[in-house]
Amino acid sequence: METRINLPQNEMPSAWYNALPDLPTPLAPQLDPQTHELLTPDKLSAIFPEALIEQEMSLKRFIEIPEQVKDIYRLFRPTPLVRAKRLEEAIGSKCRIYYKNESVSPSGSHKTNTSVPQVYYNKLEGVKRLATETGAGQWGTALSFACSMFDMKCTVYMVKVSYEQKPYRKILINAYGGEIFPSPSMQTNAGREMLAKDPDCKGSLGLAISEAVEDAATHDDTKYTLGSVLNHVLLHQSIVGLETEKQLQMAGEKPDYLIGCVGGGSNFGGLVLPFLPRKLAGENITFVAAEPKACPTLTRGSFRYDYGDMARLTPLMKMHTLGHAFMPAPIHAGGLRYHGDAPIVCNLMAEGLVDARAYYQGECFEAAQLFLKTEGFLPAPETSHAIRSAIQVAKEAKPGSCVVFLYSGHGMLDLASYDAYLRGDLSNYELPQDCIDQALMMCPTIAG
């Protein structure tokens, strides 16, 4: 039987799918972080190029992919959809399990799908340098790759605990020509203030975002980029779900479950959103979001307006949040340690259209080990959450169901995490409720 479904390169999608016009209820507007008034596009122009601001607010259902972006996409797209037959057999599944393999991109993850267009649109507007944050390093690697493709400078602020856990990320980012600093750093006011308060601070995505936004806002030749959360990021990632839809049709399948890990929502949104019109039309498709118990944004966070960063420089967005002041535990899935989630994903969660599940890192590494021994590939710690969830779903689902998960990235630069797992040094951590309550007290009180 065929276990690998390859979409011909000439059938790669030519336009991204925008979910905004199809949401059952309109997305709550972004607000100015200082005045709490409606955010106007001119307020974003200090850190984003006009083309991305336009995409952020667009109500066009499809947006054409520029030829220069498709040219770089063709280095690795379309990516394969694979039947995980050996995994099915290992768990005694009566369901069919497929995974969409985004690890074949040059940077090793799905993040390249948005780094390439973001760099392209900045280049068109004469930007010389891009500043960004990264958690586990997937986004920083993807951005440095894209900048190398368009001959632009790249500065990455990497959450310090991940910077220390994953030294080879720094080497790869440097090899692409980017510069990288552990966050909190001495490069920005936000970083210096945190280090003055806590010299041993291990950082957070919220803090790294503050540093990158400050960097961009204080340098005329620099703009800011974000690898998740925002509408235009999920737009670019929709190529994943659009390809998956075509590949499932080639295999004669209709998905019953679509599963992705969730930190900020980019890979999960990219997989499931193109299927939203079908779900709203009555097809029985379950969207499953897998997250860590150490950072349970969707499962235990509050749905409210909050800042996207610790220094309160970013727009206020209505999302599920643990509070922008939240300082996560140093679990190894660094890309899933963000306090908030994409407003689009949270909107669907609030509508009851997303099934969110939280897992301990130990059980996710066990699932990753099983995947490695059956399918042969080493998953990123973030991806292991989707694998753990897919195994659980396949065991619970009606026999004959079709389960599809997103293999968002490989773990070849996360070997220190696996070393800790194999030594038995990983601990299971569940975020205490009082930590959530304390962080939420710092959120602004805004009606709506």
Image (spheres, rainbow, N blue to C red):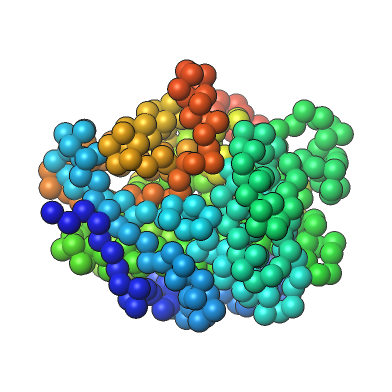
Residue furthest to the top in view is 424
**In this picture, residue 32 sits left or right of residue 370:** right
On the image, the x and y values in percent for residue 285 come to 26, 56
Residue 175: horizontal and vertical position, in percent? 66, 53
| Residue 187 visible, this angle | yes
Measured from the top left, where is residue 415 in percent x and y? 52, 34
Q: Relative to residue 48, is residue 222 drawn left or right?
A: right
Q: Is residue 164 above or below residue 66?
A: above
Seen at 37% across and 28% down, the residue is 366
Q: Which residue is nearer to you in this view: 322 or 234?
A: 234
Q: How many marks?
A: 0
Q: Splitting the image into 4 quarters, where does residue 184 fall?
A: top right
Q: Residue at x 74, y 42 (%)?
A: 183
Dividing the image into 4 quarters, which one contains the N terminus? bottom left
In the rendered image, the vertical position of residue 356 relative to residue 111, given as above or below: above
Residue name at image x 43 percent, y 56 percent: 104
Name the side, left or right, on which 210 lies relative to 54: right
Residue at (74%, 73%) from the top-left corner? 127
Q: Nearer the viewer, residue 127 or 442?
A: 127
On screen, residue 262 above or below 428: below
